[in-house]
Amino acid sequence: MKAKIMMLILGGLLCKGTDLWAFPTTDLFSAPFLVVPQLIEQNWQDLSPQERARALENYKRFKRLPPEKQRTLEEKYNRWMQLPDEERDRIRRNYDRYRRMDSDQKEDFWRKYKYWQSIPRD
């Protein structure tokens, strides 16, 4: 049940139209999983009416996606869940640090990230 609730909540968060996949700590995982970690452990009955409404809206938005996009999001979610807790915590901390950056710091961060991505790997 918890996994289904998590999919309800996170599935829609991924579909809001904002670039939630932009944080480059890893290409496999997304910010929505970083936004609501406290909800992961809750049952549906533990959610507030507002959280339930948000989860249902997110689920509806998720279901309107093309099947291929749904599969992609589910695969990313499954990879995220397979990470060790320590790795997920590290990614959450990095994302929190990124969110606190001002626009100049973010611009500098992306410039360095793009450079790093352009370096050929063996």
Image (cartoon, helix red, strand yellow):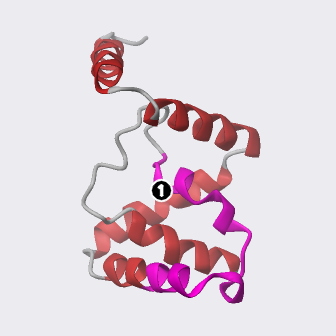
Q: Quadrant of the C terminus?
A: top left
Helix or strand or loop: what does disc 1 sit on?
Answer: helix
Residue shown at the point (74%, 69%) measured from the top left:
41
| Residue 89 place in picture, x, y as percent | 68, 41
Q: In terms of depth relative to the viewer, which is nearer, 107 or 12?
A: 107
- What's under tag 1, amino acid-wise? Pro
Q: In terms of depth relative to the viewer, which is nearer, 52 or 19?
A: 52
| Residue 108 place in picture, x, y as percent | 31, 15
Q: Is residue 19 left or right of residue 27?
A: left
State the extent of the magenta-drawn residues as a range. 29-56
Q: Is residue 78 left or right of residue 32?
A: right
Q: Is residue 6 left or right of residue 22?
A: right
| As drawn, 109 above or below 33 | above
Residue shown at the point (27%, 21%) measured from the top left:
107
| As drawn, 12 above or below 63 | above
| Residue 42 place in picture, x, y as percent | 72, 75
Residue shown at the point (75%, 46%) measured from the top left:
85
Query: Would you say residue 54 sits in the magenta stretch?
Result: yes
Total labels drawn: 1
Magenta: main secondary structure equals: helix
Q: Is residue 120 left or right of residue 44?
A: left
Query: Would you say residue 109 sits in the magenta stretch?
Result: no
| As drawn, 94 above or below 53 | above
Q: Quadrant of the N terminus?
A: bottom right
| As drawn, 71 above or below 76 | below
> Looking at the rendering, which quadrant does residue 103 occupy?
top left
Crowding at dot 1, Cα within 10 Å, few <14 / some 14-19 / many 20+, comes out as some
Residue shown at the point (41%, 62%) measured from the top left:
73
| Residue 43 place in picture, x, y as percent | 71, 81
Residue annotated with mark 1: 32
